Image: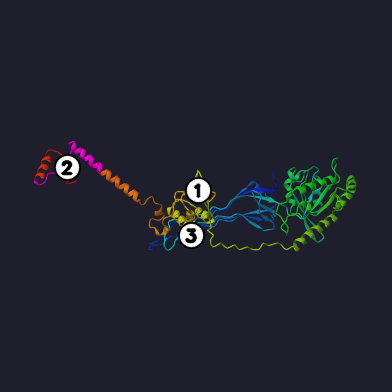
Amino acid sequence: MASFVDRVVLHVSGGNGGHGCISVKREKFKPLGGPDGGNGGNGGDVVLRVSHQTTTLLDYHHSPHRHAQNGGPGMGDWRAGHTGDTLVLPVPDGTVVKSRDGRVLADLVGEGTEYVAAAGGQGGLGNAALASAKRKAPGFALLGIPGDERDIVLELKSIADIALVGYPSAGKSSLIAAMSAARPKVADYPFTTLVPNLGVVQAGDVRFTIADVPGLIEGASEGRGLGHDFLRHVERCAAIVHVLDCGTLEADRNPIDDLDVIERELEKYAVDMSYAGADGQAQPLNERPKLVALNKTDLPDGRDMAEMVRPELERRGYRVFEVSATSHAGLRPLGFAMAEIVQAARDAVQAAPPKVAPAVLRPRAVNEAGFTIRREERNLEPLFRVLGEKPEKWVKQTDFTNEEAIGYLADRLNRLGVEDQLFKVGAKPGDTVVIGEDNAVVFDWEPTMMTGAEMLTGPRGTDLRLADWERPTRAQKREDYEDRKAARAAAREELEAERRAGIWTESSRRRGPEKDAVAAEEAAEGEWVDDDDDL
């Protein structure tokens, strides 16, 4: 089981905002109490915080999904929902936060440094907060907005002043154990060091940290061996110390060739901008100050090899130190040389004032609409997509099962100028309009003929503008009139056919007393009397 993890993909999501409450005050002797629905609580944030108690990302390797607490819903009697608790995730010092595409989001260095990885959602307003002079008792409330949800990459880069690099089994772990109180694992086989080790060294008045980076081999910058995953730990170091094995038993290896291989790998490694100097630039690894430590000089063959290669290394401009991690020979001069480089780097950082970007205030333009409308096409039909922070936020807050809430959204969009802009871009009634990109709301656009839902009468939670009733047009009225006229004519023809068949008796031509006598006689005989005057 892994005990050290320096790169994880973390799935974080902020807490969802609580929904607003729909409530009306009902109390004895207070018949007109009014709305008293409380607001929903905001969701909790997910925060990354540097902690010296944390040295690895192992916890997030086993549990990569983290979610903050949701906000509570609002309640009656003006009671607001509770705010979700912030979820604090401790990370080691030197953690770099990146997006999935490799973009650096934050560089967390220093105890207590924080970064909000996922913000919580905003709580919805209750109907008490939505009441106005004209809308005295709203029958709706706003919904809570879901919290941010994203995937981030956490990469750990050790905070060290000096990096010890070299081939496997060159004696780096033994060297850091001899110079500091660190006790890394030391064995007589390659790739013993599987994780970076840190040690604190005191040289005179200077205290600095050295890092033991796992062994590098040829092709490490391309993924061979263990060096590809741990080269990032060298990026924060002020200097590099090449630890060369002078006592190797391999016939095809020598310190000069080992140095050339490691130098090529450092040159190929691309340093990202997650750690830059005061000038805003990240110095490549092969251009940083370097020292050479010829290790294992306590061996007879090792001392001879060190005397043989030392002139060539000095000719190349390296400061060379013959050391032995076993006998501690030469470690003190090497420690003071490291301290000199570290102190010079610290003085340079203090001398160069940090560049602080001036604050740029960008006020909202007078003619800025706050949204854009993009014309698209779907199934050979026009489609208009509305994009903007306010429209997309308002859609998330709307309960589409409540007619009054839909009407309130229509009024807000109309006041923002969405309908006027749709007319300008060529939208026609019945065209498809989409608000937002992901989880968008799609509807057939019908221009609002009258605005102000608070001016419309009706039960709470309804909007007369969304009812199925439509005012008939002149053509519809004319068509209805012709249909009734044709129906009356058909009824007359049917009655006339029945009269001719003998079912009805025509008596409309008879007048005076004879009419009543004939009618009584026909009624006595069981026949029907049809009198047009009575129709």
CA separation, marks 1 and 2? 64 Å
Look at the image and say whether residue 499 sits in the magenta stretch: yes
Q: Circle 1 is placed at which residue position?
A: 383
In the rendered view, does 50 fall on the left or right side of 456? Answer: right
- Looking at the image, is mark 1 or mark 3 earlier in the sequence? 3
Stretch in magenta: 489-513
**Percent from the top left, x then y, of residue 496?**
20, 40
Query: Given this view, does label 2 or label 3 mark the residue nearer the observer?
Result: 2
Q: Is residue 77 visible?
A: no
Point out the image quarter for the N terminus: top right
Q: Circle 3 is placed at which residue position?
A: 79
Look at the image and say whether residue 464 sits in the magenta stretch: no
CA separation, marks 2 and 3? 75 Å
In the rendered view, does 341 fall on the left or right side of 448? Answer: right
The residue type indicated by label 2 comes to Asp
Of residues 263 and 231, which is closer to you in this image?
Answer: 263
